[in-house]
Each structure stands twice: as structure tokens, then as C-alpha cells.
């Protein structure tokens, strides 16, 4: 039987098995006296995707193991596809991705492969894009992505993506943009949830 011991609201000097402590974040201690931070799910501040060519989420914490990018009614003034780039050192990684996206439509299926980002083959001009893409740490600085986006302007446009990329360091940056890099957002909302 386990016993849960709650200690002070600041870290104690010597970790003891079973302790749960608070110091801005929660910490737990195992039977070997190893203290580890107990991470939580954090929702960033939603950004209106109504202007600009990209939306950046910066200064992401080093403990992240999963990021979910969420889109609600997003569109642009151009015909490029949706692109997510992650990065280190406060800048996006723009190469080295291995990504495939399939567009499922009544007129037939089509595929798009990408190396500059996690690209969703869905288009954006006059569309209203909804859905989520999850990016997860598999090991070291290697990340895998998967998810589905749907165009609700028509009932026959759905994109599924899968991909991977290895960063040069710890992830601390995410950019949401388009494959052209020049299309301007004109509607919708973008946000992320991250967790350890």
C-alpha cells in the first residue's frame, strides 16, 4: 500500500520518498529519492488568425513531450496548404521533415509529401479549416506528427497527415503558416496545448 505525504509549499532540502512538494510546479519523489517535476497540461493563449502570414508560439518550456495544434475556422487569401514547423533556439526548422498528407475528396484522393514542415494537403483559400494535429516526442530531439483537418466549407475535403523530424536541440518554438509562406490569414483561431 502506498502512502501519499504532502509537505511544504516550497521544495524541501532533501527529497524523501512519497513527498509531493510545490514550488510553482508540483514535484514528486520516488523510492530512490529522485525528485521529478510533475508536469501539467497547459493551454496557450488563442490567436486570431485574421492577419499576417504566420503565427508563432515562442519560449516553449523544455519539458514538453506533446503539442497539439488546434484550428477553428481558419482560412487565408491564398491557395497554399497549412504548414506547421517546430524549432529550437527560437527559430523554425525549415528542412529535414519527412511528411505525407492525404486529401480525401469525392473527386478522388490525392497525396502531398513535404520536407519543409508538417504540411496538410487541404488548401486554404475561401475555406474554413478545423481540426487538430498532434506533435509528440518519440526520443531525444525527434518528433512525430499526426492529425486530421477538415474543410467545413465543403463536405468533401479532409486531410490526414503523418510525419517526423529531428531537431538540432530541444524544442522551444512552433510556427503555424502555409506552404507558400506568403498567404495571409483572414479568418479563424489557432491555439496549442502542450504537456510533459
Image (spheres, rainbow, N blue to C red):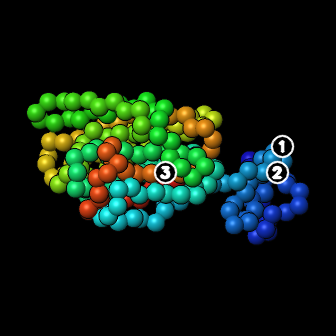
Seen in the picture, residue 81 relative to 45 is either above or below; the reply is: above
Quickly name the residue at label 2: 17
Q: Which mark is residue 86?
A: none
Left or right of 80 in this view: 16: right
Q: Position of residue 138 (x, y in %)?
A: 56, 34
**Residue at 89%, 61% in the rendered image:** 13
Q: Residue furthest right?
A: 14
In terms of sequence position, does the residue under pointer 3 or pointer 2 come before the other? 2
Left or right of 81 in this view: 115: right
Local SS, label 2: loop
Q: Are marks 2 and 1 in contact (CB under 8 Å)?
A: yes
User: Alpha carbon of mark 2 to alpha carbon of mark 1: how far?
Assistant: 7 Å
Q: Which mark is residue 174?
A: 3
Q: Mark 3 or 2, which is nearer the eye? A: 3
Local SS, label 3: strand
Q: Residues within 10 Å of mark 1 (few under 14, many from 20)?
A: few
User: Alpha carbon of mark 3 to alpha carbon of mark 1: how far?
Assistant: 36 Å
Amino acid at each position: 500500500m502506498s502512502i501519499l505525504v504532502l509537505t511544504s509549499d516550497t521544495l524541501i532540502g532533501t527529497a524523501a520518498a512519497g513527498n509531493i512538494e510545490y514550488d510553482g510546479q508540483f514535484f514528486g519523489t520516488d523510492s530512490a529519492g529522485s525528485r521529478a517535476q510533475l508536469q501539467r497540461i497547459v493551454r496557450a493563449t488563442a490567436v486570431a488568425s485574421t492577419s499576417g502570414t504566420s503565427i508563432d508560439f515562442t519560449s516553449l518550456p523544455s519539458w514538453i513531450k506533446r503539442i497539439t495544434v488546434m484550428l477553428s475556422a481558419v482560412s487565408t487569401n491564398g491557395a497554399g496548404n497549412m504548414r506547421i514547423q517546430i524549432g529550437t533556439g527560437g527559430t523554425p526548422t525549415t528542412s529535414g521533415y519527412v511528411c505525407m498528407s492525404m486529401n480525401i475528396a469525392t473527386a478522388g484522393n490525392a497525396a502531398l509529401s513535404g520536407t519543409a514542415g508538417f504540411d496538410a494537403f487541404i488548401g486554404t483559400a475561401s475555406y474554413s479549416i478545423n481540426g487538430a494535429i498532434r506533435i509528440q516526442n518519440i526520443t531525444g530531439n525527434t518528433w512525430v506528427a499526426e492529425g486530421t483537418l477538415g474543410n467545413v466549407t465543403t463536405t468533401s475535403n479532409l486531410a490526414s497527415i503523418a510525419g517526423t523530424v529531428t531537431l538540432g536541440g530541444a524544442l522551444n518554438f512552433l510556427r503555424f503558416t502555409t506552404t507558400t509562406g506568403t498567404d495571409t490569414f483572414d479568418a479563424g483561431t489557432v491555439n496549442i496545448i502542450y504537456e510533459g
